Each structure stands twice: as structure tokens, then as C-alpha cells.
């Protein structure tokens, strides 16, 4: 065991190497933004997938989100299939929300791994929701004001945490622990199940959950041009002029409606899959990627998402342990040595504890890992590691948003007369860590001030934004 003074020196030397490895210079930041912007632009080409494009870049036709009417249902299906959320939203004659209800269902294990059973369970959830909220009795009666026709069925908008094509088919399942619905036509499968179950519901739209969040944001603020979600995974959607989407333009070079905009689901977490050198990967990132379920896939996501940030910190902690620079020999470190045992949720209280004692580290490690009596120097090292990983994540999140805003602002400015644009952010990563959110927004604003002069309003959406957006889309037919 090295002497105390020698150990402190070696701790600081290793911490310095880690900080240097995770730092993103202004030049690297600009390279990331430029590469992301170029990929977003290339993604609108017709042959993008054939030339090995990284992103999904699927256009979604969204209804007139400014004019929802009547009562509609929204359904949110998690990528893992573990939960199904259903809500109803009723809009009055002025298109304002007049009432709503939400219910959450936990999918039985027996239904998760069989597609037919899964859709049958969804139909069961819909029936339960309709009965619980007495929605069937409202059909056929015109309780709203104006000359609106009575509703014969309830329109249902579906939001799903997987990439879907504009033909409602799930495009990939390259995520950890997700539903195996690849190639499934969600709308058709659910329509068939609903008809067999004799439910007064009709599926009107299927959108990715980030596109649904964008719809919700635009209902509240029509100037919203980007919605980004930082959860277990990461994704972003933005508004694009239909004439820039080659797959939607006729051979004559014109779309059916030259002033129309579509929502583009980017699947931005895929970035770096084909060109990992663009991203500032460290040895700890490569280790995490190599040991993941899908090595080489969704590289950017593995640097920023809630699912992975805690594991990056844990890998750093165990490397300090292997170098005999953390904890005493008497500590039982088996719990912290287990993969994914250090959750990203632990980082926020550790970072936010600015006291000289760093007591949050002691509390969390004693409660979760059975490690107590941690020295002050060791507690400070752990807090610094959390700050380093979170700091890089906020820089990368800011770069993602900067590329999206620069891409979307040109289209939105021409469509809205150059008015101020808005960005909607959501996700457990920001819900848990206020400092990370504030640093991300500051990074975005600083970049725009230095490079484009554009200004944006940034606001944080609640966790049900995708669910409400699906209902707004369904009610806007």
C-alpha cells in the first residue's frame, strides 16, 4: 500500500489524465457540430440508406396540431414494452384542452415476448381505460359546442419508443432490452386486434415518441423547431421543409404542398456508428461499447444516455481501485464491481453536494454498496469523476442541440418570418440532474451566440409530453 502522501499524488495524477481524456476542446466541439449537421443534411437524400447513412431520418406527416377537436386517445409504448400508458384528451371549440385522464399499465412477462400476446394485451388495456373513464358513453352524443358532428369512434394516436418508418413499421431494435417488433406494422396489427375486440377506437397515427413530444411542444408553442429526449437512450426530432426531403419530392422536383413541413425523426443516438473517430471516445467508452449488447451501435448514445453514464463512472472507479488509489484493502468491493451497479441517478446528489465533506458519496456508497468509512480524499475523487463524466455529457448534448437548431432554424425562419425559435427538452437525465441541464442549455446558447447569432427559447417538457402529443395528433384530423 503506497504511503498517504504518495497515494494522494498518484490519485491527482490519474484524475488529471481522466479529466484530459474526457475534455472536449472548442475545436473538437465544432467538429462534432459540423459532422452532425452534415449527417442531418445528407440524411434527407433519397439514397442516404444505400450509401451507409448512420441516422434514421424518417419523415412523419403530422396533423394540424393547432386545431385539435373532440376527444382523442393517446398511447405511449415503451421500447422495452414494460409499460403502456394511455390518456384521453378532450378539446373544446377553441381547441383548448378541457379535460384529460391518464392510466399506466404494466405488461405481464408472458405478453412481452410474444407479438400476438402483446397486441392482445394492448387491446385489454384500451378496454380497461375506456370503462374506467366512462368514455364509451360519450360517443354518439354531441356534448361540445358549435356544429361539430357527434363522434362515432375515438381516434387513437400511438407513440412508441422505437424508430418507425412512414409506413408505420418498426425499423430497428438495436437497443438494450427492447421489444422485438422489428418489421411489424404497428398500426395494422393494432387495428386488427381492436376490430376483433369490438372496441370503438380507430388508429389514426403512429409516431416515434420524440416526434410525439415535438407535436406536444408545437401545440403549446408554435415556434418549436426541435424536440430532444435524453432518457435511457437519446433521440431528437425537428421540423423540415418537405421540399428538402428527396423521398417526398416528385420527379418534377416539387412536392404536393411546397409550404408544408414534416417532422424528422433523426435517431441521433446512432451517430458515430460508421465514423466513431468523429467522437472523443476514451478507453472507458470503448470498454463499455465492447461489453454492450450491441457493440459498435448507437455510439453517441453510449456517451450521453442515462443508461450508460453511471457505468462509465463505475469503470473509472474500478480502475482507480485496480491501481490501489480508492478504498482500503478491508473494504468489500464486490457490489461496486458488478456491471451497471452504479446508476446514473447517483451522480446528481454527489455533484450537487458542494460541501467540503462530500457526504453524499459516503451515504450512497454505504447504503448501496456496503462501503463505509471512505476517506475524504477518496470521496473527493469520486465526486470529481462524476463531475467529469457529466461535464462531457453536457458538452455533447449541447453539440447535438446546436447542430439540430442550426439545421432547423434555416427552414423554420423562412417558414415563420424569422421569429424566435424554441427547443423542447425532456428526459430523466435532465429531471435528475439540474446542473447538467443548465450546462447543456448554456453550451447551446454560447455556441449560437458565437457562430450564428440565433437565439432560442429552451424549455423542459414533462414526462408525459409524448403521450399528450400522440393525443393531439389524433385529435387534429
Image (spheres, rainbow, N blue to C red):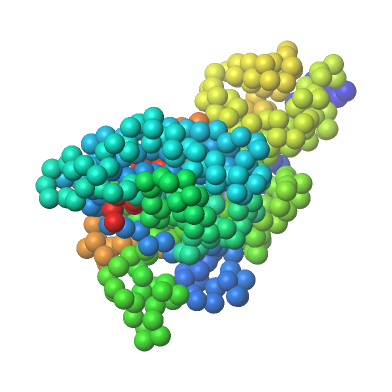
Of the 4 image quadrants, the one containing the N terminus is top right
The x, y position of residue 414, in whole percent, is: 27, 67
Q: Which one is in front, 278 or 9?
A: 278
Residue located 55% across and 73% down the image: 48
Q: Which one is in front, 208 or 440?
A: 208
Residue located 61% across and 49% down the image: 115
Could you tell me how many numbered marks the image carries? 0
Left or right? Give the position of 104 relative to 89.
right
Left or right? Give the position of 62 relative to 175.
left
Left or right? Give the position of 349 relative to 209.
right
The x, y position of residue 422, in whole percent, is: 32, 50
Q: Residue furthest left?
A: 146
Q: Can residue 361 be seen in this view?
A: yes
In the rendered view, would you say 86 is above or below 205?
above
Q: Can residue 325 be seen in this view?
A: no
In the rendered view, would you say 135 is above or below 182?
above
Of the 4 image quadrants, the one containing the C terminus is bottom left
Amino acid at each position: 500500500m503506497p504511503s498517504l502522501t504518495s497515494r494522494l499524488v498518484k490519485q491527482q495524477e490519474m484524475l488529471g489524465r481522466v479529466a484530459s481524456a474526457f475534455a472536449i476542446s472548442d475545436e473538437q466541439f465544432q467538429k462534432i457540430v459540423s459532422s452532425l449537421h452534415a449527417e442531418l443534411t445528407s440524411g434527407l437524400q433519397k439514397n442516404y440508406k444505400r450509401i451507409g447513412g448512420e441516422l434514421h431520418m424518417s419523415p412523419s406527416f403530422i396533423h394540424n396540431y393547432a386545431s385539435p377537436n373532440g376527444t382523442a386517445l393517446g398511447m405511449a409504448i415503451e421500447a422495452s414494452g414494460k409499460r403502456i400508458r394511455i390518456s384521453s384528451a378532450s378539446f373544446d371549440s377553441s381547441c383548448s384542452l378541457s379535460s384529460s385522464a391518464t392510466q399506466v399499465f404494466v405488461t405481464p412477462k408472458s405478453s412481452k415476448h410474444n407479438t400476438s400476446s402483446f397486441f392482445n394485451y394492448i387491446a385489454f388495456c384500451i378496454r380497461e381505460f375506456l370503462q374506467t373513464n366512462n368514455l364509451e358513453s360519450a360517443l354518439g352524443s354531441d356534448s361540445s359546442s358549435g356544429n361539430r358532428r357527434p363522434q362515432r369512434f375515438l381516434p387513437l394516436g400511438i407513440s412508441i419508443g422505437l424508430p418507425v418508418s412512414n409506413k408505420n413499421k418498426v425499423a430497428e431494435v438495436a437497443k438494450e432490452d427492447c421489444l422485438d417488433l422489428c418489421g411489424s406494422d404497428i398500426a395494422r396489427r393494432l387495428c386488427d386486434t381492436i376490430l376483433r375486440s369490438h372496441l370503438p377506437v380507430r388508429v389514426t397515427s403512429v409516431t416515434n415518441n420524440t416526434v410525439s413530444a415535438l407535436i406536444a411542444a408545437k401545440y403549446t408553442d408554435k415556434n418549436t423547431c426541435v424536440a430532444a429526449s435524453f432518457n435511457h437512450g437519446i433521440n431528437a426530432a425537428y421540423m423540415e421543409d418537405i421540399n428538402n426531403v428527396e423521398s417526398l419530392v416528385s420527379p418534377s422536383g416539387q412536392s404536393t404542398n411546397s409550404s408544408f413541413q414534416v417532422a424528422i425523426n433523426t435517431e441521433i443516438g446512432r451517430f458515430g456508428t460508421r465514423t466513431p473517430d468523429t467522437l472523443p471516445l476514451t478507453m472507458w467508452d470503448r470498454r463499455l461499447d465492447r461489453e454492450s449488447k450491441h457493440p459498435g451501435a448507437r455510439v453517441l448514445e453510449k456517451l450521453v444516455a442515462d443508461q450508460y453514464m453511471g457505468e462509465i463512472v463505475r469503470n473509472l472507479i474500478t480502475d482507480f481501485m485496480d491501481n490501489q488509489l480508492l478504498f482500503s484493502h478491508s473494504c468489500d468491493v464486490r457490489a461496486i464491481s458488478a456491471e451497471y451497479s452504479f446508476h446514473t441517478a447517483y451522480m446528481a446528489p454527489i455533484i450537487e453536494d458542494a460541501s467540503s465533506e462530500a457526504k453524499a458519496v459516503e451515504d450512497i456508497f454505504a447504503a448501496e454498496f456496503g462501503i463505509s468509512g471512505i476517506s475524504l480524499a477518496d470521496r473527493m475523487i469520486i465526486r470529481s469523476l462524476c463531475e467529469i463524466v457529466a461535464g462531457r455529457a453536457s458538452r455533447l448534448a449541447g453539440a447535438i442541440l446546436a447542430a439540430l437548431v442550426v439545421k432547423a432554424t434555416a427552414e423554420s425562419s423562412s417558414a415563420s418570418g424569422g421569429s424566435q425559435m424554441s427547443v423542447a427538452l425532456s428526459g430523466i437525465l435532465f429531471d435528475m440532474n439540474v446542473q447538467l441541464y443548465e450546462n447543456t442549455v448554456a453550451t447551446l446558447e454560447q455556441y449560437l451566440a458565437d457562430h450564428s447569432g440565433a437565439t432560442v427559447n429552451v424549455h423542459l417538457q414533462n414526462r408525459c409530453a409524448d403521450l399528450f402529443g400522440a393525443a393531439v395528433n389524433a385529435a387534429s384530423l
